[in-house]
Image: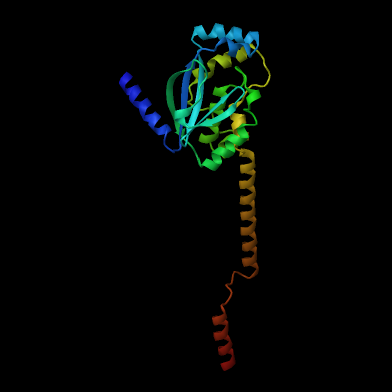
Amino acid sequence: LLHTYQSETKKIERKMEEATDDVILNIYQLEPDDETIQQHSAAVGFFTRILTPMGMGAYHTSLTVRSHTYSFGAGAGIVKTQPTHEQTPPGATYHSSIFLGSALNATNANISQIILKLRTYFHGTSYHLLNRNCNHFTETFALCLLHSAQDLCLGKAKLLKKYPGWVNRLAKNGTSFINHGDVCDPLEEAKAAIGAEEIMAKESFENMSSSNSGKKEEKKKKKSGGKKELSEKQKAVLAKLKQSK
């Protein structure tokens, strides 16, 4: 089993360096240092120290797609790097990489547009150990890449089954005890970042315009009695026949 796991991990690592549509979650195990904890409230530090030994470990994640790795951190905000040059928090130890799925329409231009919109929510000063951390970012970004605008807008999109729940369990349990206000909602923020409502409105308008155009054409045919117009050549032949009578 260990050999199989290591083999699969190596395959994923090779994919990370290729410009493919594969969406790969990179997981690092970490122990929050005193400096990190001091950046937040004493209550946050308390739950970090209490819950971690209970099996709710602290993890850092990043997301790789089309030969680039994206991560989110305090101060820096969203960072884009080459997979081999990824910057990880102090004391982070590589844990594993998980293939989440193949991105839909993952052109570099589309990815850049999504990241630009995600920066509205994930900027350097918005980072919070419990409410808005690196794991919230990778889950939201993955939802943007793996769900269609229609599914996100109509509420058909669900949280990703392949995204491991234990990665952000520490933060979610901490948030349930402490109300710190603005907590990240991955589905809603993915919906906004991908511009789902705008895309659906545009498609609806185009379908309506196409439908109206078809109705006008149908009315025009009915008015003409469904008869086809004669070509210039046919009109000339008909004129000659009338003259010969």
Q: Quadrant of the C terminus?
A: bottom right
Please count the marks in the image.
0
Residue 75 visible to an observer of this rendering: yes
Report the residue at 36% width, 30% height from top: 11
Q: How is the image coloured?
A: rainbow
Residue lying furthest right: 181
Q: Measuring from the top left, give residue 107's x and y in whole percent.
A: 51, 42
Relative to 218, residue 87 above or below: above
> Outermost residue, bottom direction?
244
| Above/below status of 114 relative to 43 | below
In front here: 148 or 225? 148
Q: Residue 124, how many percent across, how many down?
A: 63, 25
- At 58% from the left edge and 87% from the top edge, which residue is drawn? 239
Residue 5 horizontal side relative to residue 109, left or right: left
Q: Nearer the viewer, residue 180 or 156?
A: 180
Q: Is residue 37 left or right of residue 19?
A: right
Rendering coords of residue 81 (x, y %):
51, 31
Vertical side of 74 occupied by 16: above or below: below
Q: Residue furthest front?
A: 85
> Hey, which quadrant is residue 143 in on the image?
top right
- Nearer the observer, 81 or 15: 81
Residue shown at 59% from the left, 89% from the top: 242
Q: Residue shown at 59%/72% (left/top)?
A: 227
Judge by depth and name the residue closer to the eye, 56 or 92: 92
Describe residue 126's horizontal placement relative to residue 80 as left or right. Answer: right
Q: Is residue 245 at least partly visible in the picture?
A: no
Quadrant position of the N terminus in the picture: top left
Residue 24 point in image, percent of width and height: 45, 30
Q: Quadrant of residue 149?
A: top right
